[in-house]
Amino acid sequence: MPPLNGKIVTVVLFIAVLLGVLYCYISQSYRVVLSFEERFKASDKEARPPQEVVVTLSRHELHLVSQDYLRYKQPSIVQGRTDVVTVTPWLAPVVWEGTFNPGLLDTIYRPKNITVAVTVFAVGKYIMFLKNFLETAEQHFFVGFRVHFYVFTDRPNEVPQIKMAAGRQVTVMSVPSSNRWQEISARRMEIIQTLIEQKLENYCDYIFCLDVDSKFHGRWGTESLGGLVAVIHPGYYRDERSRFPYERRPASRAYVAHGEGDFYYCGGAFGGLLQEVHLLARTCRENFEADAKVGIEAAWQEESHLNRYMWINKPSKVLSPEYLWQDFKSRNSEVQIIRFSGVVKNYADIRPN
Ligand SMILES: CC(=O)N[C@H]1[C@@H](OP(=O)(O)OP(=O)(O)OC[C@H]2O[C@@H](n3ccc(=O)[nH]c3=O)[C@H](O)[C@@H]2O)O[C@H](CO)[C@H](O)[C@@H]1O
Ligand SMILES: [Mn+2]
């Protein structure tokens, strides 16, 4: 019966073609998934060229990978925030709420197994801020990632016991007190430099150096990671740069001339890759000490030196003032979320001078 045979042959051929197409489609999507995953998994550090590796995944793994990496809201290059600038003239991102996908970023960084170090100084009466700082960090700072807080204090017995999530810990380090707050603040650079050299190399990937007189109110996570990360000061970002409180004496190594400078950055929050922050801390410390030898203390101590450094060595990521607001300031409309903010404090009560 030739007509039936013909039908069978057609059906068989059709199924074969269908299976072939299906096979090509599936192997192609495995390839796409893996080249994407490998790009981020392969290295702890930044900018490693993508590698394509073809491996067979179980259905469960494929499900996880495609769920985590590939299912998210469609990005757009024509729609997004228009009320703020989200990139610097040297093409560093400026991180504002609404410019990033937190879940996507977390899944990119999770396989890298990163550890983030935090330095926080609580010298003298500033110990009173530590409990709130640490408790709110547990709620908002790199939740789900390994974080090691290094607390520097002259009052180790007064460090509060805070329950930390798995993979997170506090180490208390003793530092001498001083009768000048300016010195306590500025000396942080030297201590950060030494900490990186002696304890963090080959252990941590990133570090953030934060003021203790502050609290977390919202997410501060993987979106903030970068080579050299600076935070824009909430007090000056709408001002002309001639009004920034840079060090204006040419004799100082922190000098920034009128008509120069990019932004005014905070001394109370900065970070990045270990090596980058090490170089920053070492340079600021050396410049601070060179100034001291000729009897100069910059207008805002290490903050002035940091601003000079960031002007010469442009940060690769800039965090908007969402990342260091001040509680006494009312929120400006472009600030949709306050993530970290300085608490209101009575300087006369808490500073040694
Ligand atoms: C929000 C922000 O950008 N703050 C910066 C700003 O003033 P601030 O008024 O925020 O300075 P501050 O009094 O908070 O001192 C900075 C930090 O030094 C530590 N500390 C200070 C005094 C003391 O007795 N004990 C103690 O532990 C503590 O961690 C504190 O958070 O300008 C300072 C310049 O010197 C620093 O650059 C601060 O980081
Ligand atoms: Mn402060």
Image: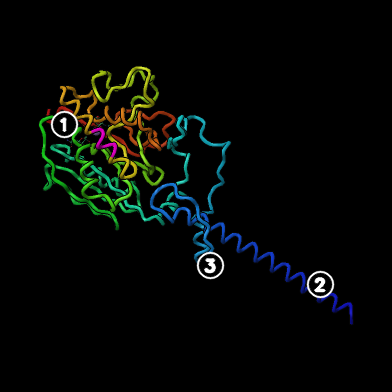
- The image quadrant where one finds ligand 1 is top left
Does 162 sit above or below residue 254? below
Which of the two residues, 69 or 272, is positioned nearer the viewer here?
272
In the image shown, does 205 or 225 lie closer to the viewer? Answer: 205
Q: Which mark is residue 163?
A: none
> Element type at marker 3?
loop
Among numbered discs 2 and 3, the one appearing first in the sequence: 2
Q: Amino acid at mark 3?
A: Thr
Q: Amino acid at mark 1?
A: Glu
In this view, 343 is above or below 294: below
Q: Name the foreground residue: 165 vs 221.
A: 221
Residue 53 vs residue 160: left or right? right
| Quarter of the picture holding the C terminus | top left
Instruction: State the extent of the magenta-drawn residues as a range.
Output: 279-284
For the stretch drawn in magenta, what is the main secondary structure? helix
Helix, strand or loop at disc 2?
A: helix
